[in-house]
Amino acid sequence: MLINNCPVCDSLHVTSVFTRDNIPVLQNILMKSYEEACQIARGDLSITQCSDCGFVFNRTFDGDKVVYNSQYENTQSYSTFFEQYLDDLVTDLVTKHGIRNMNVVEVGCGKGLFLKKIVDHGDNVGYGFDPSYIGPEVLQGGKLRFEKRLYDEDCTHIQADAVICRHVIEHISDPVSLLKTIRRALEHSPHAKVFFETPCVDWILDNKVMFDFFYEHNSYFNRQSITRAFHLAGFDIVKVKHIFNGQYLWVEAKVNTSEIQIQQHAEPFINNQAGSKWFAQHERKWRETVVSQLEHYAINGKVAIWGAGAKGVTFLNLIDPGRTYIDCVIDVNPNKIGNFLPGTGHEIIGIEKAAQRGLSTVIVMNPNYFEENTLLIGSNRIDVKLINIEEWSV
Ligand SMILES: [Zn+2]
């Protein structure tokens, strides 16, 4: 089914950015064998931008194809860089935003690691909601509670002082409905502070990151479209800023309790369609550049990529679906090591195996981890050339 109207502002003024057919519907799913990895369900990407609010979405998204179960694995905190980033975020919430001795709800809490940090650091009580949660329902004598379900209007009994939702809204095809559901759950918590984190589509377009569009993410926001979505759902925006070196948007909002919805616009939507157009025109050129670089480095020995997350999975499905150029994928997440990359079947290995594998070149998928990966290569005494994928931008 083709989505014709902008899922945020309902405008019909939407234009195609680019399309990609037959791509894996999940990127962060554990695949135990090569065969299983290659047989993953597939769908089409039809990236589309609204000219009125700037929202970007996959107009051919089919939610029935994407099932988040206990095989979904997206823990990023095995990276010391990411762990530090999370710790800084928690410190900021506790010290600058006063999230201390409060009831904190996390929507889409994953395995609950972030919520646990908030509870420990600020002496808070945490309520985590996630259909893919695995683990005990009650921890730390009741200070941490988890429910394997969505947070919705049946949760109004929880007097929430803060609601945190990180990296969830980009997976939702009707983001305004998600926000309205949270708004209804806060009916008896009108003073709750609301915090959201999601990738910034302007960063993807401006930096021409070809592999940051994938099936799991069907909603891509910029400052203007996220502001519009929150207003439509009955929230007031306190602040929207860029974090994680510009890759993510951080939204602070509060419940709009007035009878009349005030239409606030932080700033007018600046049409970024120059950036969008660039994508369609230059994807082929980028692929050619990457392949010629891979052919060049293959002369010296085997080539790997670093990062079995969504960026790495998308990159290899675009560039090396037949496993011609890339030998394997390195990752620091022990839950991913020994599994196979969704769609292509590249083996995922730990850094300690890199030497015996005979690798000579490793391409780092996210520039934010380049320094950390350089240190890991050094401390493991592995003689490989590390390349920042940004160097191959065209
Ligand atoms: Zn729109």
Image (tube, helix red, strand yellow):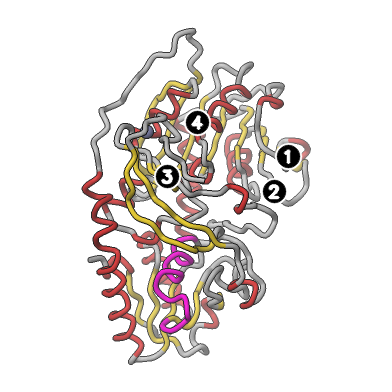
Sequence-first disc among 2 and 1: 2
Q: CA distance from mark 3 to mark 4?
A: 13 Å
Type of amino acid at the residue the image marks with label 3:
Phe
**Badge 2 vs badge 1, beta-carbon distance below 8 Å:** yes
Q: CA distance from mark 4 to mark 2?
A: 24 Å
**Does residue 254 appear left or right of residue 204 in this picture?**
right
Type of amino acid at the residue the image marks with label 1:
Glu
| Res. 334 image quadrant | bottom right
Q: CA distance from mark 1 to mark 3?
A: 29 Å
Q: Nearer the viewer, mark 4 or mark 2?
A: 4
Q: Residue at x 46, y 45 (%)?
A: 88
Sequence-first disc among 1 and 3: 3
Q: Nearer the viewer, mark 4 or mark 1?
A: 4
**Badge 1 vs badge 3, beta-carbon distance below 8 Å:** no
> Mark 1 sits on what residue?
147
Q: Residue at x 72, y 36 (%)?
A: 143
Type of amino acid at the residue the image marks with label 2:
Tyr
